[in-house]
Amino acid sequence: MPHCNKQMISFFLTTKCNLCCRYCYNAHERAQIKEQTLPLEIAKAGIDWYFAGNDSRHIRFYGPGEPTQEFDKLKAITAYAKASKNGGERVTTEIQTNGVFTEEVRAWVLDNLNIVWMSFDGMRDIQDYNRPLNPKYQAAFGGRTSAQVLEENVRWLIQNTNDRNLMVGARVTITDKNIDRQKEMVNYFYDLGIRYVWTNPLFYSVDKIPVCDDKVKRKLFSFDMDKYLDNYIAAYRYAKEKGLFWGSFLTVNFDGESAYHCRACTPMGAPHLTPDGYLSACDMVLMGTEAYHMEKLIYGKWNSQKRIFDIDAAKVAALRARSSDNIAHCKNCEARLHCGGYCLGEIVNETGELDGQKPIQCAAIKRLLKEIGTCEPYKYLHP
């Protein structure tokens, strides 16, 4: 089941966040706007619209901030979907969260969510360096660090899962702080009770212009892909022996064949509702207003007067046409059906084009396909 088959409606609940992650890809964007939260009216309309036109009943909560910062809205949207005449018992729920939340939130998570991906960078020294608490929230957590709160919540959720349909996994950003500690992280997560981990190599943050036009950003960015791959492959094999899944964003399509990389190219089956009421195709395009060079991935908007979502059919068609069957540099590639042109959000952010290329990632995917090969369908697809 390739990554593009993960069909769902995603809610970008709020721009508020209780962490200050060093590499956050939208921190600069959020810092320039007033805090915003997805209106409940639009979220409910999104559920009605999505359930009426799609077979999927999977709902998901994501950034641009920390979704549990809008806990009441998180609860209300979930309850509305489950009470919907088109939803009910068929509804499944997912969240990507930083995991730094209160006991009240985690008790609700235990009983109401099915898939919980913790944004979690590994051992305490790494987590607390990469993902420190926002100083405004330190008192709320009794002076504990993000790692301490996160560890406690992970352990508690896993220990209390019992017969609930709940999976708690980790989504890890790989930086120079943890790139060569992946086997160590396998042991760390295993001891916490986590059995499913997806790793993501560090990528460029989003700003007003494509990275190709930003000399300063390119000069400051550094990531050793060969070092990541060497350590990833060793950790992947080690984790497999321990019974832990150690995935990579570079391998999201290794469990099937598809000319599409991800759900961004199937926008009507996987809409993302932004806090300002737009429809985005991608997790990297979190606001519709002033999306700048990422505007290609904004294809609709809530019309409050007509009470419908206005869809830009031309943009939808352009996104659907973006596949490895149609991209020149993909057509003769041996990995094209296990890559699909790579991540559309990263491509547009870095090249400004829907059919751009990231050569380093292309080479990395080919190497991984050769060294670890394809696999059975993943039980839990990448967040």
Image (spheres, rainbow, N blue to C red):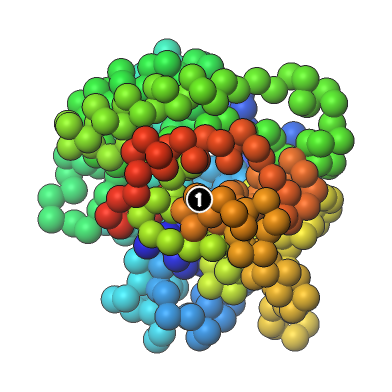
Quadrant holding the N terminus? bottom left
Q: Residue at x 39, y 22 (%)?
A: 231
Question: What residue appears at the point 59 percent right and 54 percent down from the top-left corner?
Answer: 332
Question: Relative to residue 156, is residue 60 depicted above or below?
Answer: below
Please indicate, yes or no, whether residue 291 appears anywhere in the rendered image.
yes
- Label 1 Cα crowd, 10 Å radius (few <14 / some 14-19 / many 20+): few
Residue nearest the viewer, comparing 203 with 241: 241
- The percent coordinates of residue 335 (x first, y second) are 50, 50
**Which residue occupies 49% across, 58% down?**
337
48, above or below 199, in the image: below
Residue 253 position within the rendered picture, expressed as x and y whole percent measured from the top left: 44, 53
On the image, numbered disc 1 is attached to which residue? Answer: 334
Where disc 1 sits, the SS reads loop
| As drawn, 304 above or below 101 | below
In front of the other: 26 or 353 = 353
Instruction: Identify the image quadrant of residue 297.
Output: bottom right
Give the image location of residue 374, x and y in percent: 34, 49
